Amino acid sequence: MDQKTSLRFQLLSACCGPAFLVTFVFFWGILGNNIPNPSPSLSAEELALRYQNNLGEIRLGFIISMISVCLYLPWCSYLSARLQQIEGKFPTLANLQLIGGALTVMVVSFSACFWAIAAFRPEGNPELIQFATDSGWLIIDLQYACTTLQMVAFALCVLSDKKGQAAGTPLMPNWACYLTIFCAVSFFPASLTGVLKTGPFAWDGVMSYYFPYFCWLCWETIASYFMIKDVRRRIRESKSSSASLSLEAQPA
């Protein structure tokens, strides 16, 4: 594959980050009725009624979100390839970032699948609907560690890029890396969702839902911005290099 084509694929992969953000917020959050999300203190009957009253939106939201969440994969793939350039021969952090990103997609997909199952027979046993809903939320909230490791590996790798910093072309500035680490550890309170049904640490609470999810989306936005900016810079450098070679090849 020639460099021009490769750079186009890299730019497309980097742009999958913003595409994932938009589709995730709209289908998973708005259509899926996860903004706001259901309280774990709802009774089985109240929860079943919630599905029945918003059935079309919930079904469409979670079915499409299980497809669109895969946009996270090419984004992580490009990021891993870029980190591998920084690490060199033994890309431990790049691989950890890629594995963490892939597992994040699986966690989000499995949780949405449980909610789609709950919406499949909304007229059925309310307790089974409650069980499927609980399973979805506990899966996505308690298995945050794979995403935390992904983000920390990403930040540490970029911070260690002495060559890029010396050249003035790091993938992200240091402040964005430290923000990434902060956003990664913001998930820790979600561990309490496996115990609490009310309050700020329940799965519909500020500390276990709104704050960490906001942090994750902020990180995704900031990282996507710098990734796209990095690819565009390398595209310009490639064009400039090609133009210079063409001039040198011209007869005097």
Image (cartoon, grey):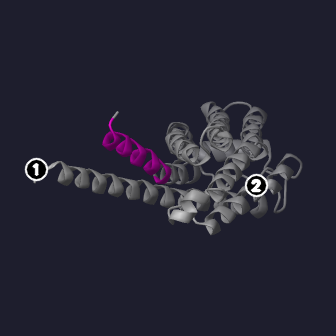
Magenta run includes residue 125: no
Q: Is residue 129 left or right of residue 61?
A: right
**Amino acid type, label 2:** Phe
Magenta span: chief secondary structure: helix
Say which residue label 2 marks: 187
Under circle 2, the secondary element is loop
Residue 130 appears at what percent x and percent y? 76, 39
Q: Can residue 34 be seen in this snapshot?
A: yes
Q: Residues within 10 Å of mark 1 (few under 14, many from 20)?
A: few
Q: Which mark is residue 251?
A: 1
The earlier-in-sequence mark between 2 and 1 is 2
Q: Nearer the viewer, mark 2 or mark 1?
A: 1
Above or below — where is 194 with respect to 252? above
Residue 93 appears at what percent x and percent y? 67, 44
Q: Quadrant of residue 119?
A: top right
Residue 45 appears at what percent x and percent y? 75, 43
Residue sitting at the far left = 252
Depth order, front residue of 136/123: 136
* Distance from Cα at disc 2 to Cα at disc 1: 62 Å
Pointer 2 with pointer 1, Cβ within 8 A? no
Q: Quadrant of residue 110?
A: top right
The C terminus sits in image quarter: bottom left
Q: Residues within 10 Å of mark 2 (few under 14, many from 20)?
A: many
Q: Is residue 118 left or right of residue 82?
A: right
Magenta run includes residue 8: yes
Q: Can residue 36 be seen in this snapshot?
A: no
Q: Is residue 52 left or right of residue 194?
A: left
Point out the stretch of residues depicted in magenta.
2-18
Q: Quadrant of residue 92?
A: top right
Under circle 1, the secondary element is loop
**Amino acid type, label 1:** Pro
Above or below — where is 244 with respect to 173? above
